Image (tube, coloured by chain):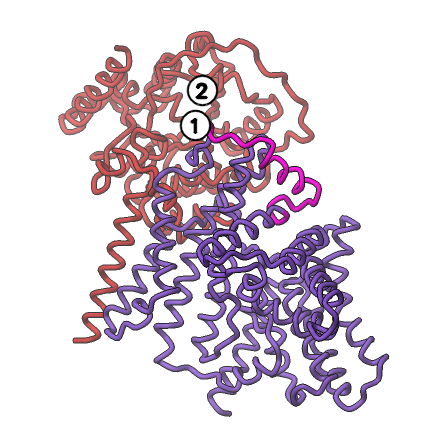
Amino acid sequence: MARSKIIKLLILLLSILLYFIYGNYLLIILLTSIFTYLLGNIITKNKNFFLIVITYLIVLLPFIFFKYITNITNLNLLQPLGISYYTLSLISYISDMYHNKYPKCHNLSDFLLFSMYFPCLFIGPINRYNDFYKEINKISFKKNNVYSSLLRIGIGLIKKFVIANHLMIIINTVATNLNYNGLYVLFSLFIYSIMLYNDFSGGIDIVLGISKLFNMDLIENFNHPFKSESIKEFWNRWHMSLGNFLKDYIYIPLGGNRVSKIKNKINIIITFLVSGLWHGIHYLLWGFINGILVILNIKTKNKYVNYFLVFIFISILWIFFIYNDTFLSIKMFISIFKDFNLSNFNILNLGLNIYHYLIIVLSLAIIILYENKNILKNINNLYSKIIILLLIVFMVLLFGRYGINVNTNNFIYGGF
Amino acid sequence: MKYIKIFLIFIIFFIIIIVSGKLVSLKYINDYPEGSFISDYYYEENNHDVIFLGDCETYTSFSPIELYKEYGITSFVRGSSRQLIGQSYYILSETLKYEKPKLVILSVGGIVNTNQIKEEYNRLILDKMKLSREKYELYKYSKMDKENFLTYLFPILRYHDRITSLNGDDIKYLFKDEVVSHNGFLINQNVKPLTVLPTKKNLSSYEINKENIKYLDKIRDLCKDNNIRLILEKSPTAYPYWYSEYDKQIKDYSIKNNLEYYNFLEMDINIDYQTDTYDSGTHLNLNGAKKITRYFGNILKDKYGLQDHHSNDKINKEYEKKIERYEREINEKNN
């Protein structure tokens, strides 16, 4: 057996084993994947309407049950790990098979690797079979990838454990005490933006770094989202795998922009409502407002002012994610205007001391350097590479927030 | 040459991790001194006649320095906060690697506790304990969810969050340690009288956990195998309640196993919960400890024939220093 096939098989077995240990309900993901593989391949030849409905139902039923029905009925059940991610990947496969977009999968183990590739189940990105297939056929171990992969994993760890987990303290402090005045609420929203970016993109960095170790270049999920000049641009740069999914499987099938202006606007709203619904039932209003902002497309001539405005709007809308309740989110949003008091504001009252802020600022500087310049990436000297990687490990170990008393070890987007 | 350089880089990294771990670890000197009691034992120069084991009742009730001053008996309290009976077993196992005392006195107050309730209690006993098989077994016995032995090998994994709140002790004691206790005894001269005793609750079961009895058996057997006399005792505390049902089970156990059991709650030691406690009757203060130590010391001398070491120059010299430090600390706190 070729070396790459052995690596592929080992990754699949490891994914199944890890899912068995950590994933909850291994049988659901296995059966759903096998059904999708079998029915998807039949669909390529037989475009039977009922068959496609049945296939969608089989894939969507566990998702609807665990995501919505358990929520509405207050059933206290563990959610299968990565159900949102693999469900969307499987739906994309069925749809693509129906439209004959690319050749069907001929190998069940390749298909299982696509649906169960363990790193992606934690936090995404949402893979498409044709992209993923190209990458799994490249699977190998290349010495040249080791430094860049480990560097990216290290950067992901800094983002998650040093930055996001510390910033989470501020958010929890404000969110659990509704007596904080409007300025604190506003500040916590800005912090949430920075925290969520570091938490989510940090997780993606780890996933993409691990994949790169096996020579797989999975799709990027972020493209400098805070360099967006409009809300529309922001959503083209943030959680790109979800954005592309919604564009290809919701927005374009609805007619996209090849319809009347009114219909196009309705299509945008529907797409964002679906995005809200994917996050959870509480996020419908969040999706709707985002849709409106995309349609309004507020912009000035100065790009820096635009960056700032996008940051403000996007940050304020995260209020639905912080409070997890539509009415409470609206109430807290109103409090920003009703109870805005500059005189009492002190960032040292939010659970972090001055040294924490220094560590966060230093770490953010490293992240900005990594994401915008190639200084760290283009190092050729072996010893310098080892020292940089060890310094990152040291930084995470000493300055990270993790361990027995920390409840924020999970990635936020792992829950969606 | 290339591999040697890489190896050296990793060695330096390892040293940095170890030193950083030491920097951020709790030093247990001025803050949480209870965490030093177990390790203070390693600084002892001579063997002991008596080893005390048990929870906080031991290190607040028995003062080895008073015991030596009055009777010339050498002793050490290897007690720790909420020490579980299984932990006492492993501490005894470790102690026997260093010496074989004549008596082991086990405080039974903690025998009613089953699981550990806070990771911090495990930290107080384990953090400064020397790396050994006993340490690992003790960890396994009382480990809590999410607790990981790696954090005891590499303290940076547990205490890294202290990097933003280091204090003077962290620098001062980075590469050195200091004996904190007085042979495992904690001097506390504060007085907080007992005012209202909490209501005595009826428990659903008064039966001492079988697992705990199993560890009591193991302590009994370990002492027997090493020709050490095991004595059980219950210190005088007003609260938590030492139910008569508990007492009966310990009495029955001691009779069945031919052990002595002293319930100081039933003895006329003249403990006054208005003056002899620092926390309304849960622990004794120095006054209370002096009373019970003298009382018990008399029994130990008369009944078990322990030798007065005042005439032993080597031991006396060591204890003179200890007495001086003990009295200095008492006087400093008085002033």
Shown colour of chain B: red
Q: With respect to residue B26, does B298 lie above or below?
A: above
Is the C terminus of chain A in the top left, top right, bottom left or bottom right quadrant?
bottom right
Tags 2 and 1 in contact by the CB under 8 Å rule? yes
Nearest to N terminus: mark 2 or mark 1? 1
Amino acid marked by disc 1: Cys
Residue named by callout 2: B283
Residue placed at 56% from the left, 50% from the top?
A313
Q: Residue at x 51, y 52 (%)?
A: A311
Start-end of magenta stretch: A320-344
Q: Position of residue B98 (x, y in %)?
A: 28, 42
Instruction: Tell me the subunit letter for badge 2.
Output: B
Residue B264 vs residue A288, the one in the foreground: A288
On the image, which quarter does residue B1 sit in?
Answer: bottom left
Report crowding for label 2: few under 14, some 14 to 19, many 20 or more residues within 10 A (C-alpha).
Answer: many
Query: Which chain's colour is purple?
Result: A
Instruction: Residue type at mark 2: give it.
Output: His
Name which residue lies at 68% across and 57% down: A276
Asked whether A326 falls inside the magenta stretch, the response is yes
Q: Is residue A350 covered in magenta? A: no
Q: Main secondary structure of the magenta part?
A: helix
The residue that mark 1 highlights is B56
Query: Mark 1 — on which chain does it sit?
Result: B
Splitting the image into 4 quarters, where does residue B88 fall? Answer: top left
